[in-house]
Amino acid sequence: MTVPETASTSETSTVGKVTGFIKESKAELEKVTWPTRQELAMNTVVVLIAVVLVAVSIWIADTVFSILIRTILR
């Protein structure tokens, strides 16, 4: 006959897993090379410019296709 697991055994196992995950995550974060404030600012500007360019491109394409569809449906 098998003995069912007790709640405390499964909780300890879960707590141990969570603790191990947190320790491993902390160790990995210490290996990260974090950008400087200047690098972060430059990368942010690049991303914002890219977002604006994509948004304008989509707006232009949407406008052109709207005009074409209206022309075709008339």
Image: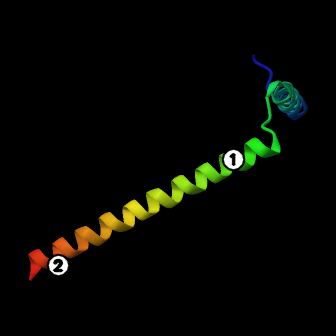
Q: Which residue is mark 2?
A: 70
Please state which amino acid type lies under the numbered disc 1.
Met
Please state which amino acid type lies under the numbered disc 2.
Arg
Q: Is residue 58 left or right of residue 13?
A: left
Q: Quadrant of residue 59?
A: bottom left
Nearest to the observer: residue 2 or residue 50: 50
Q: Quadrant of residue 12?
A: top right
Q: Position of residue 66 (x, y in %)?
A: 24, 73
Q: Residue furthest top?
A: 1
State the residue at coordinates (90%, 32%). Answer: 8
Nearest to the observer: residue 45 or residue 25: 45
Q: Position of residue 73 (x, y in %)?
A: 10, 78
Viewer-nearest of discs 1 and 2? 1
Q: Quadrant of the N terminus?
A: top right
Q: Which mark is residue 42?
A: 1
Q: Is residue 68 left or right of residue 58?
A: left
Q: Quadrant of the C terminus?
A: bottom left
Q: How is the image coloured?
A: rainbow
Please tell me whether mark 1 sits on a helix, a strand or a loop: helix
Q: Residues within 10 Å of mark 2 (few under 14, many from 20)?
A: few
Q: Position of residue 2 (x, y in %)?
A: 76, 18
